[in-house]
Image (cartoon, grey):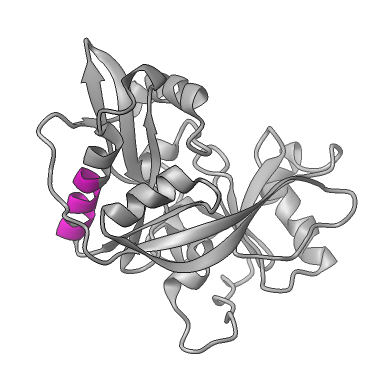
């Protein structure tokens, strides 16, 4: 079994965990979700589609990445400008932003309820209708997810995703269309932030740069723009992946 690769330096010492949040999380607090091949690390595909490749991936790295991808053949990369080999498909390229807690008025919300495994079907339905970003059957295991119900129906949610050392990402912020405009998303962001701070971490959040409404909200809540960063969606060649996952080595304890 090969050693877990060191976090690649982004070229401006000292290294900051948010410079490569996927790799920092998978070699830190989220190591139990990690799978590894060569120099490539990825979340178990039922948990999350994020992969971490070296700063300058070679052909061997892309070949190692393919078996780490889930059944749908897609994965997401953060902070890299490297494009995959021609045999791969680029499904999207997004100029993103990364914002960090500077003056967030974090506070619990009395109406917010903790979501668990039994709520996953409702969560996946809400995600399908609102498209906040990737959410998979085991994403709920990454951290605390909070929801607001109206008439028993889950109408808004937000939760924790990547956990680089000392930091926790707020993700899956979404509200059913018929309940927008009531400030539910903002309330849940503040509530999730309160839980993150209570644990001793600092909240951060990532979004598409052209999602102006979301970015404006995050800044109004007290998040500060830290950096701009690309997000890249890729699909492996059809003949690769799937069954090859049997040979993947885990980078941490067995999956829950």
Q: Whole-percent x and y of residue 134?
A: 53, 38
The front one of 253 and 105 is 105
**Residue drawn at point x = 31 percent, y = 68 percent:** 166
- The residue most toward the bottom is 13
Quarter of the image that includes the N terminus: bottom right
Q: Is residue 204 left or right of residue 184?
A: right
Residue 250 in view here: no
Q: Is residue 156 left or right of residue 75?
A: left
**Residue drawn at point x = 56 percent, y = 77 percent:** 6
**Residue drawn at point x = 58 percent, y = 79 percent:** 10
Give, as a single range, the part of the protein colored magenta: 190-198
The front one of 91 and 214 is 214
Quadrant hosting residue 162: bottom left
Q: Is residue 130 above or below residue 108?
A: above
Quarter of the image that includes the C terminus: top left
Q: Whole-percent x and y of residue 27?
A: 47, 66
The front one of 69 and 214 is 214
Q: Is residue 223 above or below residue 7?
A: above
Majority secondary structure of magenta residues: helix
Q: Whole-percent x and y of residue 13?
A: 50, 89
Q: Is residue 187 left or right of residue 36?
A: left
Q: Is residue 17 above or below residue 204?
A: below
**Does the magenta portion include 164?**
no
Q: Is residue 81 left or right of residue 182?
A: right
Q: Whole-percent x and y of residue 126?
A: 42, 23
**Residue drawn at point x = 43 percent, y = 43 percent:** 213
- The residue most toward the right is 86
């Amino acid at each position: 079994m090969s050693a877990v690769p060191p976090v690649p330096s982004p070229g401006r010492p000292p290294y900051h965990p948010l410079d490569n949040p996927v790799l920092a999380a998978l070699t830190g607090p989220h190591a139990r979700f990690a799978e590894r091949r060569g120099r490539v690390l990825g979340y178990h595909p039922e948990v999350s589609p994020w992969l971490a490749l070296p700063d300058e991936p070679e052909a061997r790295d892309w070949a190692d990445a393919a078996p780490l991808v889930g059944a749908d053949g897609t994965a997401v990369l953060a902070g890299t400008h490297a494009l995959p080999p021609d045999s791969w498909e680029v499904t999207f390229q997004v100029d993103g932003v990364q914002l960090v807690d500077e003056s967030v008025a974090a506070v619990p919300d009395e109406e917010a309820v903790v979501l668990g495994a039994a709520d996953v079907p409702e969560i996946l339905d809400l995600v399908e209708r609102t498209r906040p970003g990737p959410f998979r059957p085991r994403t709920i295991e990454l951290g605390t997810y909070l929801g607001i119900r109206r008439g028993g129906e889950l109408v808004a949610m937000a939760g924790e995703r990547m956990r680089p050392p000392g930091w926790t990402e707020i993700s899956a912020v979404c509200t059913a269309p018929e309940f927008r405009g009531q400030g539910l998303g903002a309330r849940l962001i503040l509530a999730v932030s309160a839980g993150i701070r209570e644990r001793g971490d600092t909240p951060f959040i990532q979004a598409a740069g052209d999602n102006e409404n979301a970015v404006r909200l995050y800044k109004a809540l007290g998040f500060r723009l830290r950096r701009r960063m690309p997000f890249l969606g890729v699909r492996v060649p059809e003949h690769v992946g799937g069954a090859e996952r049997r040979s993947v080595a885990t980078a941490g304890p067995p999956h829950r």
